[in-house]
Image: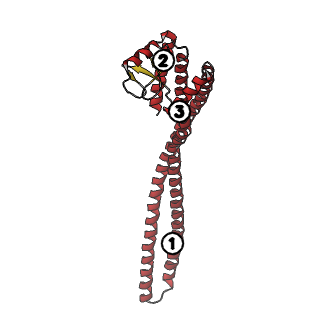
């Protein structure tokens, strides 16, 4: 068996895991921001209700001042009744008092309507406060979870980067350069297993003679079509098989991430 093949397989498995972990790491800031979305919405709703409540309370206070002024005016009108000398003046003054009382009733009605709105806004504000409190709890939990995940990913990336460097040192420079160029040209997959006479990289059927040579694994063989380095999955011995299985799992994880 070619002694470089297991190292190449392990290197690619690490490369795939590194790519997937970096992609996951890159998503964390957006996920943290998304986790803050419900809290921002709840806070905005509470702010709007609080502002509306303050505005209606101000309107109620203004109406109450108007009512006090109007009641004082009515008392003055009633006090003048005893000063009137003619029946015509008296009747006109009574009509003026009646209209003033009607106006007073309208003001009182507006005050009652505003009090009802105040009670409604207060109930809604209490509900909004409860939702905000819950959103704060959930947002904090999710942020903590994501920050913990970010720390774990950073540690994993550091470990995998170190392992990647150690494996890369086991390869000849020319072979490592060849692997790196293939990786760049073939969407991070420089190696591909042969399954059922097919290159798993490009999904094309390869010649039977090439399949046989790949199975023997004496020399590094490449796909006729995509030029990836080929290996026979399941025929690399126990330690090598573990590398191939790790590569298959890593490739599956990369596809899920993409």
Residue 198 in the image, given as x and y percentages of width and height? 38, 23
Residue 241: assigned label? none
- Identify the residue position indicated by label 1 in the image: 71
Instruction: Indicate the quadrant where residue 105 lies.
Output: bottom left
Q: From where the camera sits, is residue 205 visible?
A: yes
Measure how far apart labels 2 and 1 are at the Cα level: 93 Å
- Identify the residue position indicated by label 3 in the image: 184
Instruction: Identify the secondary structure beneath mark 1.
Output: helix
- Identify the residue position indicated by label 2 in the image: 244
Residue 107 in the image, given as x and y percentages of width and height? 46, 68
Residue 216 in the image, given as x and y percentages of width and height? 45, 12
Picture residue at 49% right of the left edge, 43% below the top: 131
Q: Does 126 sit above or below residue 238?
A: below
* Residue at the far top in the pictured view: 238
Picture residue at 61% right of the left edge, 22% below the top: 168
Residue 200 in the image, given as x and y percentages of width and height? 41, 24
How many marks overall?
A: 3
Label 1–label 3 contact, CB within 8 A: no
Camera-near label (2 vs 1) is 2
Label 2–label 1 contact, CB within 8 A: no
Q: Which is nearer the eye, 5 or 67?
A: 5
Instruction: Indicate the quadrant where residue 99 lies.
Output: bottom left
Q: Which is nearer the eye, 91 or 141?
A: 141
Q: Does 165 sit above or below residue 134?
A: above
Picture residue at 50% right of the left edge, 60% below the top: 56
């Amino acid at each position: 068996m070619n002694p470089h093949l297991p190292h190449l397989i392990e290197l690619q498995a690490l490369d795939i895991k590194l790519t997937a972990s970096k992609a996951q790491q890159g998503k964390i800031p957006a996920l943290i921001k998304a986790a803050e979305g419900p809290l921002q919405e709840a806070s905005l709703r509470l702010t709007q209700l609080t502002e509306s409540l303050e505005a209606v309370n101000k309107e109620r206070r203004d109406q109450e001042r108007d009512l006090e002024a109007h009641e004082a005016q009515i008392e003055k009108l009633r006090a003048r009744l005893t000063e009137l000398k003619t029946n015509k003046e008296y009747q006109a003054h009574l009509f003026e008092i009646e209209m003033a009382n009607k106006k007073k009733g309208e003001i009182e009605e507006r005050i009652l309507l505003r009090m009802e709105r105040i009670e409604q806004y207060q109930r809604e504000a209490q509900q909004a406060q409860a939702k905000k409190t819950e959103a704060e709890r959930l947002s904090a939990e999710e942020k903590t979870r994501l920050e913990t995940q970010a720390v774990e990913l950073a540690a994993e990336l550091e470990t995998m980067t170190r392992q990647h460097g150690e494996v890369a040192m086991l390869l000849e420079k020319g072979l490592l350069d060849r692997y790196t160029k293939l990786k760049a040209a073939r969407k991070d997959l420089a190696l591909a297993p042969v399954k059922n006479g097919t290159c798993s990289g490009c999904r094309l059927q390869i010649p039977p003679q090439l399949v046989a040579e790949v199975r023997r694994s004496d020399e590094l063989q490449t796909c006729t079509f995509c030029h990836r380095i080929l290996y026979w999955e399941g025929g690399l011995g126990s330690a090598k098989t573990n590398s191939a299985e790790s590569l298959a799992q890593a490739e599956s994880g990369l596809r899920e991430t993409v």
